[in-house]
Image: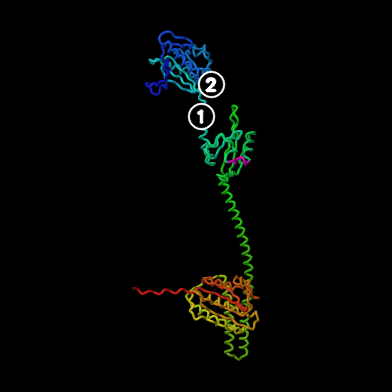
Amino acid sequence: MKIRPKSTGSTPGARASVVRLAVPSSATRVPPSQKVAGHGSGEIGTLTDDLDNLLLSSKIAMLQVDRQKCIRRFTPAATALFSLLPSDIGRPLRDLSQKFTDVTFFPDIRMVLDGGDASRTEVQSEEGHWYVRQTLPYLLRDGVVEGAVITFSDVAADALQEARFYAEAIVNSVREPLLVVDGELRVHSVNQPFSELFHVSREEVIGRALHELDAGVWDRTDLPLLLRGVLETGSSLDGFEVTYQSVSLGSLTLVLNARTLHRGRGKSDLILVSLDDVTERRRTAQLLHENETAHREAEQVRERQLELTNALRVSTVGELATGLAHELNQPLSSISNVVEACRRHVLAGTIDAPKLLELLADLAGEAMRAAGIVAHLRSFVEKAEPQHEPVDLGEIIARVPHLLLRDMERSQICLRVEFTSDELRVHADRIQIEQVVVNLIQNAMDSIEQSGSSRREIELSTRRVGSAAEVSVRDTGTGITEDAAEGMFEPFFTTKAKGLGMGLALSRSFLESHRGRIWVESPTDGSGVIVRFSIPLSQPEAPLQAPM
């Protein structure tokens, strides 16, 4: 006896397979212990034994029926779906109780016996198990349909495997790293994002305890204790933040959530852990917080600076007003005195023209002095752009003594002038340089007046030093301390009993606009002070070359 599958190509897509049996149509089941006499009986007995053993060892539920739908053979697994006993061989199939629901069971058998196609359908047993039931024709060698073979394949294993594939595909599609551990905190599974985050393969972590991963990093946190609590109480873990300190990965900030996975059927529960790597978000939030803090602090500093500026502005305005009133008071008083002298001279009736002209000259000088003070203040406030032009510095310096001659005669101060014979060509604003020299000489005069010294001299000199022109003003006045020398070029700083403190600050501003500088020195003999300033000399123009 031989059983073999065969594809029936005569009917396209009709029959999946058939069973052929090389025995006469009248053959019935031969018990294994029975001997068959005659030619070939030993071979048939052996084939029968082989077939019986094959069916007994098969885990597939199978029934073989003849054309009258009487049972010819069955496997032990078929007893889970039918109420079968060994003595049921030869009984009609309808006499047996079915342990499954299948409304097309007998119609499909009749269709196959009548030469129809093999059938396939899913059925469910009374215990809830699913099977794939197939009904195939049982053919003899000459193609005659002798009966039918019905098989029931347990689809639970296939379905479970397919479900596992679907589940793994879904889990791996989740962007968050996922970890499944058991009650002993051994890893059952991880998804692909977990492997990518911690730079490990699934094979490296599955089956290992949590405390064994990455040199025991997880064991240094509260996570193991919390996960055991989740499993024991059935509660959940939400938003647990942990700092993951690893030699290989550095510092990571992770937010964890955990849930219990109930498996049922007596199996122990598992724990599903999701991890959210918020390292960059925390770092960005920290930077934003620091930037906002720095911005607030900067705003507070600006507000304080504005308050101080306003307070300083109010104070400065007061100082300017006081200083300006003091500076203008002297020339205005002189102007008033000169005007009064002129009035008395005219009222006397004897007009002395030279005397009157002298008084008027004094009047003009004091008026110019008052105008100069106002001009100094305006220049300091406005800081107008200089009008540079090529000039000889010696020519500018030579004009200054004439402007201050009357004041120096009145104060009985001697001005000594020493000019270099070198031409000092500079690119400068005439008015500003003249104002600087006038201011230095006026300061020297004031210092001499305050000292009460019997030596009342001012030295004005020029010289060339390298590529710069240098001007010096030395007086025999009170001198200056080291602390005062450091601040004497700052606005509103003055060593005078009554002074505005703008002259030297304005002078420094003028000279810096000429790429020059100003400084103070103490003479070696300890008397008075020397103030010097220098301006770069103009570069000589290259001579034009005659064409070749």
How many other residues sit within 10 Å of disc 2, few (<14), some (14-19) or many (≥20)? Answer: some
Q: 30 above or below 158?
A: above
Which amino acid, mark 2? Ser
Give SS at disc 1.
Answer: helix
Q: 173 above or below 447?
A: above
Q: Quadrant of the C terminus?
A: bottom left
Q: Residue at x 46, y 73 (%)?
A: 539
Give SS at disc 2.
Answer: strand
Residue at the disc numbered 2: 125
> Horizontal and vertical percent for residue 296?
60, 55
Secondary structure mostly seen in magenta is helix
Rendering quarter of residue 519: bottom right
Q: 467 above or below 346?
A: above
Q: Quadrant of the N terminus?
A: top left
- Report if residue 332 is visible in the image: no
Q: 349 above or below 433?
A: below
Q: Residue at x 45, y 21 (%)?
A: 119
Rendering quarter of residue 239: top right
Say which label, 2 or 1, has the lower sequence index: 2
Q: Magenta residues, as a range?
A: 215-221
Total marks in image? 2
Please check the rendered image and state whether residue 513 is part of the magenta-colored stretch, yes or no.
no
Q: CA distance from mark 2 to mark 1?
A: 20 Å
> Horizontal and vertical percent for residue 337?
63, 83
Residue at the disc numbered 1: 161
Which amino acid, mark 1? Gln
Q: Is residue 314 left or right of residue 54?
A: right
